[in-house]
Amino acid sequence: MKICYLLQGRDDFEKTLQLTDALSKEDYVVLQINDNSWRDEATFAYAKNPNVRVSTTTNFASLGDLSSIRSWLYQMKEAVDNFEFDYCINITEFTFPALHRQEVLDKLTPHFPNNLFTITGDSTDPEIKATVERYYTGTNAMQFAAREDYRKRHFFLSKIWRFFGLKRKLDFTVYIGDPWFCLNYSTTKIFGEKFAFASEHFLLSWFPETYVIQTMWKQFASDQPREDLCVVDQIMFKTIDSTIERADYAQLLSAYQPLYKPPYEFIAEEIVEERKTLLDQLIERMKKK
């Protein structure tokens, strides 16, 4: 079984490239990265790696904004155009394979070729309907993903716009679930071809990554088999703390893929910084004497 990972590097680009290195040893990676210089570096680094495609279609993807799911849809198209795979799985640099690669495949195989993603509700629920109908200004700002007070302010403003009649008009049911998916090749191809659907209907939406895939499946691929299962935090992937040290990150990657060897400069910085800290402590003690 071959997996194509749709990887979005949102905040820590150095760790993103190390994750790409590990995943691409035996599987495929379509990499989107939120920084021009790091994207250029990735393009150069993986120019001769047949298992990696550096996406240049979109240059930014942020939590809770349409850019996230729109980028994943573009990545699906690039995956189908460049690779032959059994499943594609969306991840970020902090969504991590928690098992050895072979164990991941062993867990996925019994479910193949079913698409794996959850549906937990739909817009026949008045509360969900109201959330989907509102326009949320500010979702594409950098502060949206980082600051809860910013999100709360714009959520409140969206209620005002809706009260005065400014709301999304949709003639279909919207289905919601977890933002993670594991799709077979056929479904990935369908979604890649229909990537414009998200932009046509869900501009300025609230965390559209939790309902675009679910809704597109109902609209365009309901004949494709599905299991109500989320691979992240349920089967073989887990969300890890963004403050994880480089050495610990490299250790997790090695546990997943023994062929991965962290470069010295990736883990050496930790050693240098630790020595600096010890030296600073010594200087501080000498100053006090």
Image: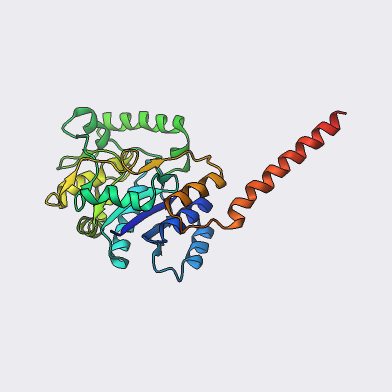
Residue lying at the far left of the rendered structure: 223
- The number of discs equals 0
Residue 195 lies left or right of residue 269; in this view the side is left
Q: Residue furthest bottom?
A: 48
The quadrant in which the C terminus is found is: top right
Say which quarter of the image contains residue 202: top left
* Residue 63 shows in the view: yes
Residue plotted at (44% across, 31% down): 148
Q: In which quadrant will I find the N terminus?
A: bottom left
Decide: is 155 above or below 273: above
Residue 216 position, x and y percent, is 20, 48
Q: Position of residue 221 (x, y in %)?
A: 15, 52
Is residue 188 shown left or right of residue 219? right
Would residue 67 be seen by someone viewing this image from the given angle?
no
The foreground one among 92 and 131 is 92
- 196 horizontally vs 233: left or right: left
Q: Which percent across, then down, holds residue 47?
A: 46, 70
Give coordinates of residue 16: x percent, y percent.
48, 52
Q: How is the image coloured?
A: rainbow
Of residues 220 and 288, the one nearer the viewer is: 288
User: Quick one: 75 or 88, which is closer to the camera?
Assistant: 88
